[in-house]
Amino acid sequence: MMREGLVIRATGSWYDVLDGDTVIECRIRGRLRLRGVRSTNPVVVGDRVVIEQNEAGEWAICDIKPRQNYIIRRASNLSKESHIIAANIDLAMVVVTLQEPATPLEFLDRFLVTCEAYKIPATILLAKIDLMTDCRDQVEEFRRIYEAAGYEVIEIAALTGKGVEEVVSRMKGRTTLLSGNSGVGKSTLIRAIDPTANVRTGAISESFHKGRHTTTYSTLYRIEGIGSVIDTPGIKGFGLIDIENSELWHYFPEMLRSAGECRFYNCTHLHEPGCAVQAAVERGEIAFSRYESYLKIMDEDDKYRK
């Protein structure tokens, strides 16, 4: 007996597959594991899959339907393997905070590069904005940098409801990936959108001032009247993979806009004379922090990003 369904939860060993209104617990057929050439997880949340039941009544995923897209990063402990976060995404929302904890801008830039590379529209949610009332200069500088790059920045405070309706309007009719560092409030935001969602929330670690991992596994929530939201475990780092140095600048939208004016068609935007990108950085049209992220990625030893 074979059926088709949507993977809504992935633990690494078991997968919850939604078929209509029925959730079926499945394992993976052994041969599927061989298909992920350098991937640690051949089946991910958001995948459309074919499942089959054996004579003992147990279900297994036996095939994966072609993906519309996916978002990927380098596996944490395996430099030549990748980890796919989720598949078939209409919109990526990356949640960042400027305090308690502060999201490293390099992490954000790497996430955005991956979204650009895999053609996934991205929106930045600037969370815990209620804690930033005395730091509006910092908030405005952040907005200036990323809005100039071409990204929408929505200020939110999930506990007070600020910005939640705006977020919901972007999610309507879409499958939205919600990602970010631990402790930035992804699960709290989902609860603000849908109080019935069964998500865990946690506090900030006092000793290290970093977020605890409150979401253990990626999970897709279907929210009536809105769409689907994929909640992911907090990510500490975001290593790029399969992006060549020669094409990296294509995934910084503000650099892409300036690069056509460079003197040399194959300009790397590092040291060449007549580089329009470097000139734009000097004029402040491209934020130095964004250009610095570009330099750090370019300076890595190989394409298996750290």
Image: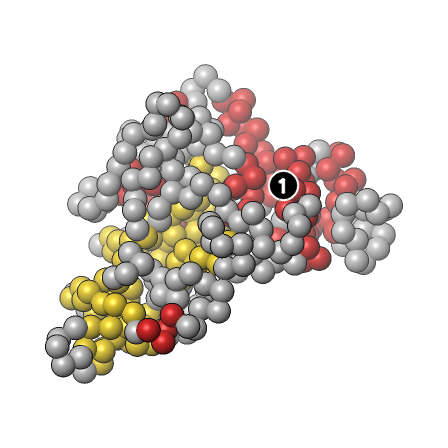
Is residue 96 positioned above or below 117 on the image?
above
The residue at the point 42 percent across, 44 percent down is 235
Is residue 54 positioned above or below 113 on the image?
below
**Of residues 35 and 223, which is closer to you in this image?**
35
Residue 137 place in picture, x, y as percent: 54, 22
Residue 247 place in picture, x, y as percent: 67, 58
Label 1 residue SS:
helix
- Residue 177 shown left or right of residue 274 in the figure: left
Instruction: Specify the quadrant of the image occupied by residue 296.
Output: top right
Is residue 296 positioned above or below 223 on the image?
above
The residue at the point 75 percent across, 34 percent down is 283
The residue at the point 68 percent across, 43 percent down is 295
Instruction: Specify the quadrant of the image occupied by residue 44.
Output: bottom left
The residue at the point 44 percent across, 57 percent down is 83
Q: Is residue 171 visible?
A: no
The disc labelled 1 sits on which kind of residue?
Answer: Ser
Q: What residue sits right under mark 1 in the picture?
A: 293
Mark 1 Cα shell of 10 Å, populated few (<14), some (14-19), many (≥20):
some
- Residue 65 shown left or right of residue 22 in the figure: right
Instruction: Specify the quadrant of the image occupied by residue 4.
Output: bottom left
**Of residues 155 and 250, which is closer to you in this image?**
250
Residue 13 place in picture, x, y as percent: 28, 61
**Of residues 264 and 153, which is closer to you in this image?**
264
Query: Colour scheme used in the picture?
Result: secondary structure
- Residue 77 shown left or right of residue 252 in the figure: left
Q: On the rendered image, what quadrant is the N terminus found in? A: bottom left
Q: Can residue 288 be seen in this view?
A: yes
Residue 201 place in picture, x, y as percent: 26, 37
